[in-house]
Image (cartoon, rainbow, N blue to C red):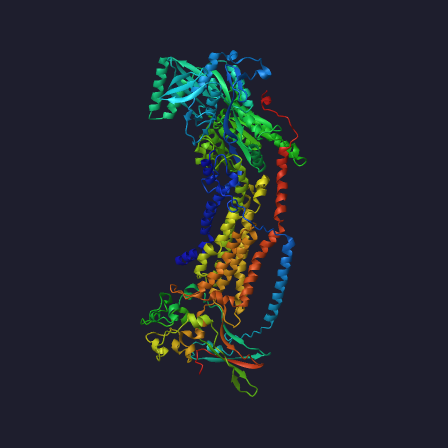
Amino acid sequence: MNRQEDGVLLKNKPDNTAFTQQRLPAWQPIMSAGYVLPTFLLLGLAFIGIGLGLLFSSNSVIELELDYTGNLPNSSCYPCTNTTIKGCKCNVQFKVDTLLVGPVFMYYELSNFYQNQRKYGVSRDDDQLNGDLQYLKNPSEYCFPFRRDSKGRPIAPCGAIANSMFNDSFVVYKMNDNGTRTKVLLNAKGISWWTDYNVKFNNPPTDNGTDLQEVFKGTVKPINWPRPAYELDTNPANNGFINEDFIVWMRTAALPNFRKLYRRVEGGLQRGNYTVEISYTPRLPGD
Amino acid sequence: MFTDFLSYMVLFNFIIPVSMYVTVEMQKFLGSYFITWDKDMYDDHLGEGALVNTSDLNEELGQIEYVFTDKTGTLTENNMEFIECCIDGFKYKHVGVELSVVDGLSSTDGPHRRICGMAGKEKEELFFRALCLCHTVQIKVEDKVDGLVKQQGTQCTYISSSPDEVALVQGAKTLGFTFQGMKKNLMKVQNRDEEVEMYELLQILSFDPVRRRMSVIVKDHSGRIFLFCKGADSSVFPRVNAGKQEEIKLHVEHCAVDGLRTLCVAYKELTQNEYDQISAQLHAAQMALKDRDEKLAEAYDDIENGLHLIGATAVEDKLQDQAAETIEALHSAGMNVWVLTGDKMETAKATCFACRLFHTNMKLLELTTKNIETYRARGAEKIHELLLELHKVVVQDKRCSSASLLRSWSVTQEYGLIIDGAALSLILKPTQDGGTSNYKNLLLQICQRCTAVLCCRMAPLQKAQIVKLVKNTKEHPITLAIGDGANDVSMVLEAHVGIGLKGKEGRQAARNSDYAIPKFKHLRKLLLTHGHLYYIRISHLVQYFFYKNLCFILPQFLYQFFCGFSQQPLYDATYLTLYNISFTSLPILLYGLLEQHINIEILKKDPSLYRNIANNALLQWKPFLYWTILGLFNGLVFFFGAYFLYDNTSLFSGNGQVYGNWTFGTIVFTVLVFTVNFKLVLDTRYWTWANHFVIWGSLAFFVLFSFFWGGIIWPFLQQQRMHFVFAQMLTSISAWLAIILLIVVSLVPDIVVKLLSRPVGRRQLQCVRYAVPELLAFRYTTDSSLIEVKNLKN
C-alpha cells in the first residue's frame, strides 16, 4: 500500500468519535430499592406535610350555600318562577354562626348549563369585545344567529354567550337586632382576570367627550338583554364591554355545573342574620 | 348527524399516531448511520466499513432465527492458494516457496519418485497447458481494480472474476508454465524451456454456477485443436470416458476431506470437422433470439462430452478471521446456522468442522446422493424411506430424551444434517400424487431438530429454495442470508434480511443486499449489538407512541360526556397540533437512537442476551396490554383528577377568580406533557447529554411556548382562547398542587412495576440462566459417538 492509498483508506474510515461509536458518556440509572425507597420516603413526608397544610386550610374554609331556585312551593322564591312577572324580587335568609374573615367570596352557581357546548363556546367575537370599531358594526360570522337582529342591525356584544348572560342580581342586608337592616358592602372590582379586564376586553374608543352611547350607535343590544351594553353600569370603568360581570360570564365554564364569582365582601361577615335580596333583572348600583 | 361524525373524526384522529410513522422513519434512517459509522465493522484491508442499503430492517436484525451462509468467500477468505494437483493419478504438491514438485502421496502411503517419472512429461505438460489456457484470467499492469491479486517480483497482475482461476494460473506459473496474456486472440504461454507458445483462442464456453465448469477451445501452432475443460468433479466425471478416473477421484476426495477446493481438468482433441460443427452449433445458439440461454446450455452440454480426464487441482481457501467464534456466538444467541454452498460435500464438511458448525459430539445425518444411490435401484421415491428413517432417528430420540429431560440435560443428543443439491431436488420435485409437501415437511422437521445444517452442491436457485422453504414454515421465522458472490444473490434476495459481503468476486451480493459488511465476523456485531439495540429501541418507540397518544386523546374523549357531546375540544388547537410535533417527539426519537438498555460491550460479550428478545418478545400481548392499561390509567387520572379537583370552584386563584374551560384543558395538558415525558425519563437507561437536552428541553419549550402563546393578542386569530390562560393558571397554588399530584399519581404504577420486577443487571443474569441449559447441554454432551446414517440403511 502506498501513501496515496492510505489517504483513501482514511477517508473511508469511520470517525472514531464517541457519538459515531455510540460511546457517548452516559449516566445509567438503575432503579434499586437502595435509593428509590428513601426518595419515596422523603417525597411521602413532603406530601404528608403539604397534605396536612392543605387539610387545615381547607377545614378553615366555611361555605354557605343558598338555593333560590324556588322549585318548592313554600320557598320564598317560588313566585318568581312564574316568568310572566317582570322584575320579580325575593329574599333568602341565612345565618352566620362564626365570624367570616374577609374577603368573603360570593359566587352564583348554575347547574346543567352547558357553557362548554362547542357551538355556544365559539359564538363570540373577541375582536368586537376588544373594542375594534370595524367588528362592532360588522360582527364575526361566529356570532350567528346572534350576529344581527331581524332588521339586520349588528348586535353588540354579539353571540350566544353574551346573549345568555346571567343577569340575576343580589343585595345582601345584615339584619339588625332592632329590625332594621343595613346593606353589606359588595365589591365588584377585580372579580375578573386582570388581563381580561385590561387587555382582552376593551370598549370601542370614545373620542374625547363623546360617551359610550355614541359609539354604540347603529348597534342593538343582545335580544335577551333588558338594557344595552353601555347601560350595564354608571361607572365608566365598569361599563360596556369592560363590565366585570360581563367579562366573568364571557369566560366560559369547563363543566356543566359551575360557579362564577359575583362579588367580594372585603370586610367579612359578622355573626348574625342576613338576607339576600335576589332580583330577577339586572339593576344599576343606584337602584 | 354526519357533520358530528366528521367533527369526532377530526377530534379523535390523533389516536392513530401519524406522527409515529414519521418518527419511526426518522429513527430508522438516522439509526442506520450508526451501523455505517461503526468502526468495529471497518476492514482495514478493504478500506471500507459497513454499508446500509435499506433502513427498514434495523430491528429485524434483532429477530434473526435462521442464518443461511455461503461458504466460499463468506466463511472463508476466498483467497485461494494452489496447494497440490494430481496428474493422471499421481499427486504433486509444491512445498513452501521451492518450486519443486514432489510426490505428495509418497510421504505417507506411496513410494518416492522423481517428477517426470510418474505421469510422464507429456501428460504433465498437457495438464499445465490446460491450466494456463482454460480460464478467463486477464493480465493488468495497472492495479486498483476489484479482485486484484498482486504478484511480488513481477510486473503483471492476474485479474479474474474467480480467485480460483487466479490461483491456478499462478500455480501453473510456479510450476514453470507462465500465462503471458492475450494478443489478438492469441494466448501466450511460456513453457519450462523459456519458449513462448502461441495458442489461438477459438471459443470460450464460459463458466456458470449451474454447469459448474468451463471450457476453452484452442488451436496450437501446428493446427491441432484442443478442448480443455475444468470444473467441479461432479460435473466433469460424468462427461469423461478416458483417463485414470478412479485414482483421480480418490485424490479429489482426499483433498476435499482436508477442506481443499478441487477442480478436475479434462481435455479432448478435436478434428477440424468436429470443430466446424461445434462452431456452427455454438453460433446458432448464440444467435438465437428466443431462449438463448437454454440453447447455449444445451450446446455446451453437447460439446463437453467424451472428455479425457487428465488431472485435478486442489486449492486452499483459508477460513476467515474469527469465523468459528462468530458461528459459536450465533449459536449461543439461539440462531440456527445453515451453510449453503456449491462446493462438494467433503470440502464443505471439513470447513464446517473447522468453523465449529459441526463438532465431534454431533450425530451427523447424511442425506446425499451417495446414500440415495443405493435406493436408486428401487426407484427415486425410496427417498421417502430414507427421510422417514432419519425422521425416526431424530424425532424419536428427541422424544425419549425429553422424558429424561428433567433429570439431566446432558442426555440430549445434538444433530447435524448434511444434504446435497441432488437430494434436495429429489425431495422438492413434485411427484404425480403431489406427495412433495409431505417430503418437504419431513425434511423441515428433521432440519428443525438439527442444530447445524450443511447444504452442499447447491445451485444458486436451490439456495433460494431452501431459504424460502424455511421462511414459509408455520412459525414464519425471520431469516438472514449472507453471501459474497453472484451465486448468493438469489438467496440474499429471498431471505428477510440479506447481507452481502464485500468480497473478491465482485459486488453483486453487496449491491443486492440490505446490509453489506466487509467480513463474516462483523455479522456478530451487526446482529448481537446493533440488531438487539434497534429491536429494543423501535419496539419501545412504537409502544410509547401508542401509549402517549392514548392518554392524550382519552381525556378528550371523556370530556365529550361533560359537554353535551358537542365535540368541544378539551385542548387548544395549538396544543393538539404541537403535542406530537414539539412537546413529546424529540425525546422519544433520541431514545430510539441512543438508548442502550444493556451496555454495548456486554451485548458483544454475551450472545445469549439475544435470546431475551427472541420471538418478538417486546411486541407481544403482555407488553402491549401493559402499555395500553398504563395509557388508559393515565388518561383517566388526567381527566377525572382534574375533574374532581376542578369541580366546585375548589381550583381558584387566591383572589376568588374562577377559571374557564381552556384553563381546565391546559391543566390536563400540562399534566399530560409532564407525565409522558417523565415516563420516558423512567424508561431511559442511557442518559447522554442529548437525552437530558431534549427531555428537559421539551418540557421547557412547552412552558415557554405556553407563556408566549398566551402572552399576546394574536391578530390572525379569531378567538383569543388561550390569552393568559397558562400564566393565570400558574398564579394559583391549588393548580400547582393539582398538577404535581396528578403527575405523581400517574407515574406511581409504572414505578412500582419497575421496582417489583428485579433490577436490570440481576434480571438479565437470571434470564441467561434460564435460557442456557438446553444450549449447554447441546454443547457438552457426553455421548461422543459419531454415527452416520449410512449404517442405518443396512
| As drawn, B427 above or below B750 | above
> Residue B365 vs residue B181: left or right?
right
Q: Is residue B515 visible?
A: no
Q: Residue furthest bottom?
A: A178
Q: Position of residue B663 (x, y in %)?
A: 48, 65
> Residue B677 vs residue B486: left or right?
right
- The quarter in which the C terminus of chain B is drawn is top right
Q: Residue furthest right?
A: B407
* Depth order, front residue of A241/B447: A241
> Residue B315 vs residue A136: left or right?
right
Quarter of the image for residue B207 reads: top left
Q: Position of residue B580 (x, y in %)?
A: 46, 54
| As drawn, A83 above or below B686 | below
* Depth order, front residue of A21/A122: A21
Q: Position of residue A24 (x, y in %)?
A: 54, 48
| As drawn, B88 above or below B403 | above
Quarter of the image for residue B453 reads: top right
- The quarter in which the N terminus of chain B is drawn is bottom left
Q: Is residue B163 visible?
A: yes
Residue at (47, 76) in percent of width and height: A189
* Depth order, front residue of B525/B750: B525
Q: Position of residue B585 (x, y in %)?
A: 48, 53
Label count reads 0
Q: Residue furthest left?
A: A151
